[in-house]
Image (cartoon, grey):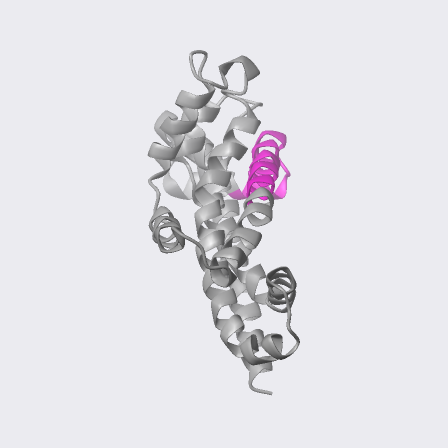
Amino acid sequence: MPTIYEAFQEAFFLIVSLNSDLFEIVLLSLSITFKAVLIACIIGFPLGTALAVLNFWGKNTLVILFNSFMGLPPVVVGLAVYLMLSATGPLGPLGLLYTPTAMVIAQTILVTPIIVANSRQIVVLLAEEYDETLRSMQATKLDTMLTLLWDSRFSLLTTALAGLGRAFSEVGAVMIVGGNINHFTRIMTTAIALQTARGDLALALGLGIILLFLTISVNAFAYILNSSLHKYAYV
């Protein structure tokens, strides 16, 4: 087994030489993660806005559930999706288990509560600010929701970035439903776990460096965007 110094050297060489195996894993990771976050946003933004604006029976229960599900254990989600997609499960005939689609489903389930809960909180605060204006305009509930969604779009982007950060770091659920199959369902987090166990530290470190860079970039962008929004609010 190479020393840590040698492993870092090899890892940087894999990155700068654009190693095909390494970047195949990275591109698949990005594809699955962005698809999951996009679907979660399509579901989560309107749902979070509805929870902020509408009043209906069971609303508080839904709010509590979505807030609680922000901390869903990934392995539990992976197990639930596995049972749904397995040969004996209700969606078994679709043949989705151990495919990238199954991984997208698992990540979407993990990210959606984060999008819903955070977007609801953002829209609630904006709704309080716009309440008198919207009442004076006799805006319908649908008009109110669309207005609040549009005017909070930049703040909602930070929520999407938070979901992206969660999806990037997820390993348990995608390992269960994806199977970590080489050249098919192997993504950065699952590959790091496997290669570390095998003793292939160079590839694991290379993927780890890229994953760390992506995570820091997402959080830095979210911080800059959030700071800009607060600065703009006081201008």
In depth, the one of 26 and 8 nearer the eye is: 26
Residue 199 visible from this viewpoint: no
Residue 9 rendering spot, x and y as whole percentages: 49, 42
* Residue located 54% across and 23% down the image: 99
In depth, the one of 175 and 74 nearer the eye is: 74
Q: Quadrant of residue 75?
A: top left
The secondary structure making up most of the magenta span is helix
Q: Quadrant of residue 234?
A: bottom right
Is 93 placed above or below 15 here?
A: above
Please state the total of marks drawn on the protein image.
Answer: 0
In depth, the one of 75 and 144 nearer the eye is: 144
In depth, the one of 47 and 84 nearer the eye is: 47
Q: Quadrant of the N terminus?
A: top left
Q: Quadrant of the C terminus?
A: bottom right
Does the magenta-highlighted stretch encompass residue 28? yes
Is 5 placed above or below 116 here?
A: above
The residue stretch that appears in magenta:
12-37
Specify whether 22 is left or right of 51.
right
Residue 231 rendering spot, x and y as whole percentages: 56, 81
* Residue located 36% across and 56% down the image: 60
Residue 175 rendering spot, x and y as whole percentages: 42, 28
Is 175 placed above or below 34 here?
A: above
Q: Residue furthest bottom?
A: 235
Specify whether 69 is left or right of 124.
left
Residue 224 rendering spot, x and y as whole percentages: 55, 70
* Residue located 49% across and 75% down the image: 128
Q: Quadrant of residue 32?
A: top right
Does the magenta-highlighted stretch encompass residue 5? no
Residue 233 visible from this viewpoint: yes
